[in-house]
Amino acid sequence: MNIANFYPGPSRVYSSIPEFIYEAYMSGILSANHRSDEFMKMMDETKSILRSKLLIPSDYEIAFTSSATENWEIISQSLVDKGSCHFYNGAFGNKWYGYASQLKNTKKVEFGINDELPVTQVSEEFDVVCVTQNETSNGTEVSNEILKKLRYTYANKIIAVDVTSSIGGVEIQFENADYWYASVQKCLGLPAGLGLVILSPKAIERAFEIGDRSYYNSLLAIIENARKNQTQYTPNVLGIFLLNKSQGVAKGISQLNEKLIRRMNHYKTVIQDLKGMGYLVRNESVRSKTVLAVSHADPDAVRTQASNAGIILGAGYGEWKSASFRIANFPAIKTKEINKLQSFLEQNFQ
């Protein structure tokens, strides 16, 4: 692959994916019924691998959906009784809030991109707290420490967290929330088209208390099938197989987390010497480890120049579209590609 892809999702897939696709074809799993013993064995093995590599607690259930976005609907339908309160500082958190507000009672708590998420009191009018852990639009993150404070402060509420741009690259303390969701086209290094859900016993209990079965993607149906190592609808079998194989050979999340931190520290030494560029997020304590947002007066010109050099950079997003571009820092990106990007930046902007 001659193109170095730093788009923040879908982004570069692991180099082993073509080999795994061929293996899937030859194994016959792509033609297997999703109620078959063959599929159930693969799904059980996949969940076991994810628990081991991502450090998911043994009493948390793992299930699959069609995408991360589908979970906005599932959460509102199956977990929200009174209402949901959404903490966010960027476009994707805002989109989640906007969608949820069409379905249930909602409240929003906005905060700045250089500020920590404010752990403020949420009234009893809202029984689900929603957080975007890694905001792809602006390159910010909510730390494990803040999520731990949320867990303590809202002990009687369900906490739902979007980890689409961090799972598989950042070490997550899953006990700090109840409903974690993502899709696979970012740090997990796979083609788009598969969503992942991680559920605490508390979330499962709440789903059964509410008892919603009105929709094809009812959380009860998802849970009941996941417990049998099945899915409620015909799944992306290839996606699950690729997740199984890629995570099976991946390093543990602690090592990957350290790798991404080292890379971000390396970017810091490069960006500080570039003319006309800087961090969009000035506060390092809330800066993402997986998506780097770089400020520039004419980001489209930078991206065009990079494209001519065989490098794909992500455009700015939302209110930061005209003032920034984004660089993915995902595990599948190779060191030689990072060196190529660094050379491009130093040659053209120092």
Image: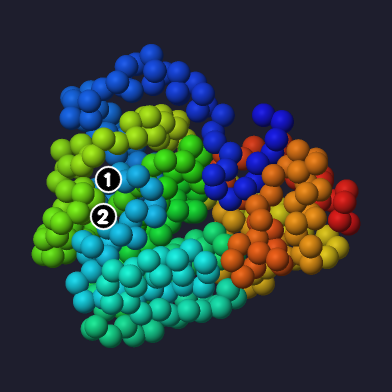
Circles 1 and 2: CB atoms closer than 8 Å:
yes
Q: Is residue 11 visible?
A: yes
Disc 2: CA contacts within 10 A as few (<14), some (14-19) or many (>=20) = many
Q: x, y percentage for residue 253?
A: 45, 46
Q: How many marks?
A: 2
Which label number is shown at residue 314? none
> Is 296 above or below relative to 53?
below
Assign a secondary structure to mark 1.
strand
Tell me the quadrant of the picture where the N terminus can be found. Answer: top right
- Amino acid at the residue labelled 2: Leu
- Amino acid at the residue labelled 1: Ala
Please tell me which residue lies in front, 314 or 281. 314
- Residue at position x 80%, y 40% from top? 309
Disc 1: CA contacts within 10 A as few (<14), some (14-19) or many (>=20) = many
Residue sticking out furthest to the front: 102
Q: x, y percentage for residue 35?
A: 18, 30
Q: Which residue in the protein does label 2 denote?
A: 199
- Residue at position x 65%, y 52% from top? 314
Which label number is shown at residue 63? 1
Q: x, y percentage for residue 101?
A: 34, 72
Q: Is residue 31 left or right of residue 210?
A: right
Q: CA distance from mark 1 to mark 2?
A: 8 Å
